[in-house]
Amino acid sequence: MMSSDEIETIALRHKLESDFYFFVRYAYKQTTGRRWLRNWHHEVLCARLEAVWRGEVRRLIINMPPRYSKTEIVCVLFIAWCLAKAPDCEFINVSYAARLAANNGARARDIVAAAWFRTLWPRCGLKAGAAARDDWRTTSGGVIYSTGSDGTITGFGAGKPRDGFGGAILIDDPHKADEAASDTIRQSVIDWFGNTLESRCNTAQTPIVVIMQRLHPEDLSGFLLGGGNGEDWEHICLPAIGADGRALWPEKHSLERLSRMKAANLRVFTAQYQQAPSQALLRGALWTQGLIDEAWRRGRLAAETQEWGRVVVGVDPSGGGDDVGIVAVAEYGDGAIVLEDATVSAGEGDTALARTLHWATRVAQTCRRWNADCIVGERNFGGDMVEATLRAAQIEDRVVMVTASRGKHVRAEPVAAFYDQGRMAHLDRFTEMEAEMKQTTPLGYQGAGSPNRLDALVWAIHELKLRSGFGYGMLEVV
């Protein structure tokens, strides 16, 4: 006769195997010690993944906002659940970066290795040598291989040639957000899917699940939904704000917060949160003449009162024979005001040394003229030499060197949002800087050369407003 503990274990095992959402909540509590924060969209995901397990859905695309539990459910807990039910399953787990995919695979492995899991499913053991994060196996012949969306998959496949579920290809955010605007990089992901990944199905019945935030009309989701690979895909779209005007997950993002996010960056919000990327928004300039004119009109009052706060000078050193961007910006109300474009043109100075001393002197003069308390310069070109040059020009102000960690147009977007929100003012007309602004789109800078004036503006506003207040994480302060 079975003991009461054995009966409880059997009942619990049956409940966990028959209800994936229950497994999600239970495994999360066992792993983290915390309760799962429930929302209806989690049930939708779990129900469709159960349909994948039953063989009712072979091609599934789920589009939803970032940080809404998609990776946890699909690429960690679904793998563990399937291995509990069929420990010989074979998975290929993909993300835009191999490191992220490997991390997801390792988290699934840690669940399978946990004492509570082994108690419930003793026949699902880890094979000796399963310490690798990107390639581990079970004692029953299960394989979990993780790779980036440009990685090598030679020798690996997904699924078992049998009736019933035998594994799957799971694709989680195959595009990197700040690279999806590049036609070349975006197409390379789609080509990799068609030329490499798709052929890794061991059987025609092997499911493929794509779960991602939308980034571009022609991203992998757009390609597949448009019939790009010749197959029909079931599509679940979960926008942050539904057609009924309600927030998808109010405990995560309230409607009020979502509205602020939309106002801050319409292009990003429309694509990544509403799952409706727009070609019109991609092609349009981040700054229009109307936005710039409004900033100039707001600056008229400041010109009369001369009432602004802390001043910083942004400097964008040239990596060669180019202009050196120098822009003075001050805190103004809940935003900022551009005080001066003091950029030094490439032709000023007969020698390299003369040009270097000239721009350093111009920075010093700009700091004194506006009583600046900080200089922000890009470290990418010149490194310590930039700060040494400024010190040689007898500049005693605090110097903050930053390293750009993302592309120019990506760094510029939160600054453009300040203009959209009516939080920027211009003390004067800055014709050359304005020209650079109007030639910057989400696809990159469309003008000739480099937008040195705009870059200097971005550094300055980041120091004044973005670094402490918004945390976009696009610059590294050194």
Image (cartoon, rainbow, N blue to C red):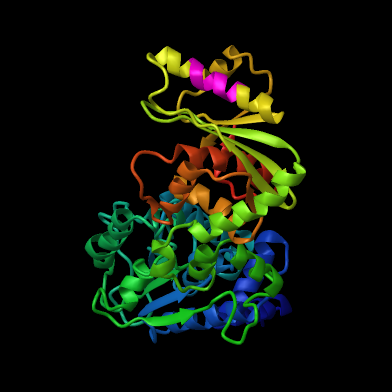
Inspect the magenta stretch and tell me whether residue 360 lies in it.
yes
In the foreground, 36 or 241: 241
Q: Is residue 10 above or below residue 296?
A: below
Instruction: Say whether residue 310 is visible.
Output: yes
Decide whether residue 393 is among the magenta residues: no
Q: Is residue 249 above or below residue 383?
A: below
Answer left or right for 42 relative to 51: right
335 to the left or right of 357: right
**Total labels drawn:** 0
Q: If the image is split into quadrants, where does the C terminus sit?
A: top right
Q: Position of residue 131 (x, y in %)?
A: 47, 47
How far across and how far down the image is residue 234, in percent?
A: 39, 83
For the residue pair 239 and 404, the one nearer the viewer reads as 404
Task: Say which residue appears at 31% left-offset and 57% top-offset.
Answer: 183
Q: Nearer the viewer, residue 351 or 316?
A: 351
Residue at the (48%, 82%) spot, across then down: 48
- Position in image of residue 120 (x %, y %): 60, 70
Position of 377 relative to 287 (above/below): above
Magenta stretch, overall SS: helix
Magenta range: 357-364
